[in-house]
Image (spheres, rainbow, N blue to C red):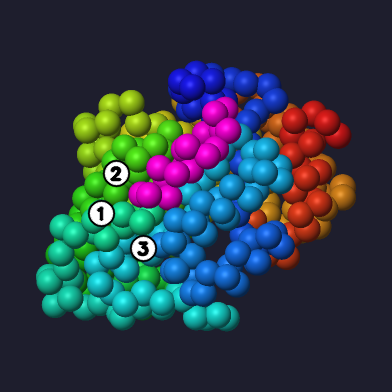
Amino acid sequence: MSDTGRKIMRVLSGESISPPPLWLMRQAGRYLPEYRETRAKAGSFLDLCYTPDHAVEVTLQPIRRYGFDAAILFSDILVIPDAMKRNVRFTEGHGPEMDPIDEAGIGSLNGEEVVDYLRPVLETVRRLREELPVETTLLGFCGAPWTVATYMIAGHGTPDQAPARLFAYKHPRAFEHLLMLLADVSADYLVAQIDAGADAVQIFDSWAGVLGEKEFETFAIRPVARMIASVKSRRPHARIIAFAKGAGYQLKTYRQKTGADAIGLDWSVPLAFAAELQKDGPVQGNLDPMRVVAGGRALEEGIDDILQHLGNGPLIFNLGHGITPQADPEHVRLLVDRVRGGA
């Protein structure tokens, strides 16, 4: 099937569709009992990401259950530093950890073997395109350089990414080198995903919201613009969604400065502002994930507000961040039905 048969691809080309197509960030996750079962079989989290049999299965699970308009490759943004030999590991209850990097470590980084290391992920992409319904968009993804770099500097997640911000101020040349290297390697990885069968890709900048104005320009916009230009120079048909969580007013020029086809919106973005952003092109979002946990009237009102403000323009309905483990699968069913007009 051509892109024209896939609703999300039509929206990414600027078309307005009613009701809007939808998918949910982290739609394959711990809130689903079938995911938990597969996760237990897989062993470690990285084994789940790197074993195509398991990664294909968990990617398909929410498509079978809800019929979302897109499936997003099951993987993680930290496979890039893992491929760069930073000893990434996921500890239950602690989240991701890796060996923190310093100036010398940045200088010795080599990105030449990253795509080859991630061939199991690309095999998952190939198999997904074969197994998904023809009308379902397949999304690939990666982390934005700033967000990936924050984990590489600190060695773990932090509340405000102070270690990375401090490192950037004290060692600007080394930090710029890290961001540009991550941009180039990530662009290669996205091109490889597209070649393997991904219809479109999303760049996750989950920690963009901790940056000041100047830093946002330098650390969030510039590397992502470099990535997108690199991908589109090699694959001009590529469609790219950029999601800068917490960026607020700085989203006003984010699309134009990065070259993204669509911008993802977190739940803190006012809907009136979102409608202004939509005048320049497709937007994606932005239901608060806690409304899915709450269910009932809170869920219904949140959905209706988004459809009222954004439903007449190019919109991909989504959450403002990933679905949480405590979400009730039945609430997700109600969300899908209401967006599609069945409730």
Q: Earlier in the sequence, mark 1 or mark 2?
A: 1
**Image x and y of residue 13, in percent:** 46, 22
**Image x and y of residue 104, in percent:** 14, 77
Could you say whether the residue bearing mark 3 is in a helix, strand or loop? helix
**Front residue (pair 286, 324):** 324
Q: Quadrant of the C terminus?
A: top right
Per the rendering, the mark at residue 115 is 1
**Image x and y of residue 253, in percent:** 40, 37
Could you say whether the residue bearing mark 2 is in a helix, strand or loop? helix
Residue at position x 27%, y 60% in the image: 117
Residue at position x 29%, y 49% in the image: 189
Q: Earlier in the sequence, mark 3 or mark 2?
A: 3
Q: Earlier in the sequence, mark 3 or mark 1?
A: 3
Residue at position x 27%, y 38% in the image: 231
**Image x and y of residue 315, in percent:** 59, 30
* Distance (Cα) linking label 3 and label 2: 14 Å
**Magenta-highlighted residues:** 122-139
Per the rendering, the mark at residue 192 is 2
Count of numbered tags: 3
Per the rendering, the mark at residue 79 is 3
Are the residues tagged 1 and 2 within 8 Å (C-beta)?
yes
The answer to which quarter of the image holds residue 307 is top right
Q: Amino acid at mark 3?
A: Val
